[in-house]
Image (cartoon, rainbow, N blue to C red):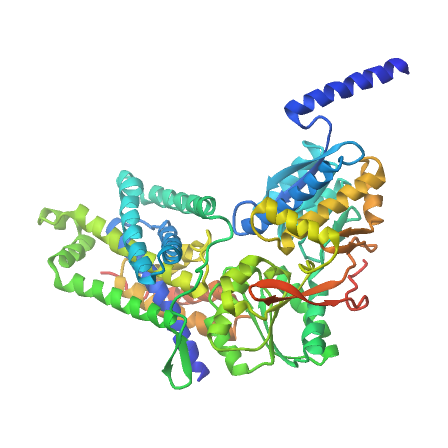
């Protein structure tokens, strides 16, 4: 026994000195697939900054149970073709204790299936497709599902803003479609009449025809799904065409870049999201200031989501006391953590249950508008 | 009213397509090469437009710079990529072109960042009432004016100058043209310059309409412009211009009335297939 102890001590001493060279001998490896090239590279970069910030915060305060965290980062180009093989590589070659997706739904779904089959925990930071957590009980999501946010949008427009005739402009991918489904499901309950719905593709930046038609539709409000790089041009073109109805978007808009693209047209645009920039919570404030310092640009939802997912994992590793996959999985499922995107806990399916933040653009910045905390309305599916 | 409005939106989109498609048609006519990397020049134009406008405050200067620089880059793409491959099969040049295009997207991202760039204070945003009840921003009006002006300028040159006649002769038969004393190389460089400069102008205008230039801005034009020149009849300049306008208008109406079934690209390609079923040689095939 004594001999064994000596050997381990010697071993760990060696490991510490080896760590200076290789930095990987005594660390807990966490896989991170994220788009760093291709069309989603901007979001990927933000998510990575967020996750790296979380790693440095955790390591700066002593790591997890004495070990440092190490991110194993792979560029998945937001493509399932890439993320599938990368998931295999992370699990079998890098021996990660868990994986995090800082990517979009397509890539996340492909990787989630492989993590679930290999029984290695996997957290989706901001991908919204409903099937991700259904891949198996090792998969979790720390952000809202599209449907949940769509329902919140219906409440915001119909009840809180009191607008009844709504035109929907829907991005025709899983993000836009699931938002639209949630919105449509609840529209009637809040007295919202959907006058028309127009679809567009993620490649579109030119909305002239749709805007001409909206002009003729004369709605009270516009519910438009998209990402900052589609919503920025869309909002600026809507206002340039002289339409002044309220525009409600979602977390896809949630970036300073949206305001930069849409310029003055962005004033008054509202979104449902998970990051409240005016929050008094110390976790959120520490994240916002830490992120701006690290990345050199203001924090956004994607960054906060990457940050949150990593902190959830670090917190679970601490509580599990080991990196054993099933212990870690159980620890994640019992999470109750205050993070940059709010209070995180999971339901039986691994979906997060938290309040929806409504943000509004005022004087060129995102600000707090209101919070939607209707647990019944916002309940994610549990199976 | 909506009908007129949608037609106008279609014409604006068609004008952009036409500016991009001209260069592609010229290159195909002269070299029989599908110049996919042309779309990278379009993106480059957008970046120059934003950077020069933000730096100098003059949009006109930005537009001129973009056309000049992109024109020169276009000419050097002929020297560097296509010229060494001319006596190989056109397939090799096509693959090289695709490779350059893909690499360019990542180069733009490395140099200018993944988030893309925007105008700090976008110029030409004042609304002009062009018809009773229909107003457009100055930027949108300028797109059409620019396209009509530049394209008719080239048309005039092609018909009325010795250079233009020589260029058309080279397209019809490069060997006969060369033996009649036409300097084929100068024609090629000239065509690359004009075609690229126009794509650069289109890039500037699109960057202004969207107030965004991003590394992947050229991805749609890279294949859409190919569809346009096929639709027009490969190598036919007039055909490409008509196809651009037709596609702009079809997409404009299609987005509204069949947009929930087909996205903008699918509408364009469905139209392409329908036309090719009736006229396999395209709208205006060259003799």
**Observer-nearest residue: B75 or B112?**
B112
Quadrant containing the C terminus of chain B is bottom left
Does residue A81 show up?
Answer: no
Q: Which of the 4 quarters of the picture holds residue A66?
A: top right
Q: Residue at x 58, y 81 (%)?
A: A219
Asked whether, in this view, residue B124 is left or right of residue A229, the answer is left
Q: Position of residue A100 (x, y in %)?
A: 69, 44
Q: Residue at x 83, y 35 (%)?
A: A322
Q: Position of residue A54 (x, y in %)?
A: 69, 43
Asked whether, in this view, residue B56 is left or right of residue A298, the answer is left
Q: Position of residue A315 (x, y in %)?
A: 79, 43
In this view, the residue farthest toward the top is A3
**Observer-nearest residue: A54 or A272?**
A54
In this view, the residue farthest toward the left is B180
Q: Residue at x 45, y 60 (%)?
A: B120
Quadrant containing the N terminus of chain B is bottom left
């Amino acid at each position: 026994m004594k001999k064994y102890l000596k050997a381990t001590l010697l071993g760990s001493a060696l490991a510490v000195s080896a760590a200076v060279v290789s930095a990987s001998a005594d660390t807990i490896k966490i896989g991170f697939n994220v788009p760093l090239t291709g069309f989603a590279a901007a979001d990927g970069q933000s998510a990575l900054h967020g996750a790296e910030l979380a790693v440095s915060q955790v390591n700066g305060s002593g790591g997890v149970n004495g070990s440092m965290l190490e991110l194993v980062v792979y560029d998945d180009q937001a493509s399932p073709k890439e993320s599938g093989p990368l998931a295999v590589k992370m699990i079998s070659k890098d021996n990660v204790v868990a994986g995090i997706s800082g990517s979009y739904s397509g890539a996340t779904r492909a990787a989630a299936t492989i993590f679930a089959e290999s029984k290695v925990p996997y957290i989706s930071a901001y991908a919204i497709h409903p099937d991700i957590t259904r891949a198996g009980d090792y998969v979790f999501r720390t952000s809202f599902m599209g449907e949940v946010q769509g329902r919140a949008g219906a409440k915001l427009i119909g009840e809180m803003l009191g607008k009844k005739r709504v035109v929907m402009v829907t991005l025709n991918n899983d993000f836009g479609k699931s938002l639209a489904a949630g919105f449509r499901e609840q529209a009637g309950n809040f007295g919202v009449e959907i006058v028309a719905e127009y679809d567009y593709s993620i490649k579109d930046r030119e909305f002239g025809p749709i805007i001409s038609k909206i002009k003729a539709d004369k709605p009270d409000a516009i519910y438009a799904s998209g990402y900052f790089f589609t919503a920025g041009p869309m909002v600026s073109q809507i206002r340039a065409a002289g339409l002044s109805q309220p525009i409600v978007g979602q977390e896809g808009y949630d970036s300073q870049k949206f305001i930069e693209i849409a310029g003055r047209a962005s004033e008054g645009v509202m979104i449902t999201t998970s990051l409240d920039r005016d929050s008094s919570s110390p976790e959120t404030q520490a994240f916002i200031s830490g992120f701006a310092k690290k990345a050199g640009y203001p924090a956004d939802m994607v960054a906060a989501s990457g940050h949150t997912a990593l902190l959830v994992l670090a917190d679970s590793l601490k509580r599990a006391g080991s990196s054993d996959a099933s212990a870690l999985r159980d620890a994640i499922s019992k999470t109750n953590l205050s993070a940059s995107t709010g209070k995180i806990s999971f339901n039986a399916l691994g979906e997060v249950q938290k309040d929806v933040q409504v943000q509004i653009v005022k004087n060129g910045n995102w600000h707090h508008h209101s919070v939607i905390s209707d647990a019944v309305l916002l309940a994610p599916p549990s199976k | 009213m909506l009908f007129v409005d949608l037609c106008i939106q279609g014409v604006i989109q068609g004008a952009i397509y036409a500016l991009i498609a001209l260069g592609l048609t010229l290159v195909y006519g002269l070299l029989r090469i599908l110049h996919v990397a042309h779309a990278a020049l379009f993106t480059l134009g957008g970046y120059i437009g934003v950077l020069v406008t933000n730096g100098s405050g003059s949009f006109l200067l930005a537009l001129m710079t973009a056309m000049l620089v992109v024109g020169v880059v276009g000419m050097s793409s002929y020297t560097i990529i296509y010229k060494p491959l001319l006596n190989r099969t056109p397939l090799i040049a096509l693959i090289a072109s695709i490779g350059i295009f893909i690499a360019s997207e990542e180069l733009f991202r490395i140099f200018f960042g993944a988030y893309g760039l925007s105008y700090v204070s976008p110029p030409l945003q004042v609304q002009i009432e062009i018809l009773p009840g229909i107003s457009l921003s100055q930027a949108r009006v300028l797109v059409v004016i620019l396209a009509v002006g530049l394209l008719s300028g080239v048309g005039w040159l092609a018909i009325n100058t010795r250079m233009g006649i020589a260029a058309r002769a080279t397209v019809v038969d490069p060997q006969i043209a060369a033996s009649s004393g036409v300097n084929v190389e100068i024609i090629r460089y000239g065509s690359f310059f004009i075609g690229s400069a126009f794509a650069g102008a289109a890039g500037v205008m699109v960057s202004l309409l969207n107030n965004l230039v991003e590394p992947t801005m050229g991805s749609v034009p890279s294949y859409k412009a190919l569809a346009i020149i096929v639709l027009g009849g490969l190598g036919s300049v007039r055909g490409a211009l008509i196809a651009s306008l037709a596609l702009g208008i079809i997409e404009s109406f299609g987005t509204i009335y069949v947009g929930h079934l087909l996205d903008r690209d699918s509408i364009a390609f469905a139209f392409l297939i329908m036309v090719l079923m009736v006229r396999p040689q395209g709208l205006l095939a060259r003799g």
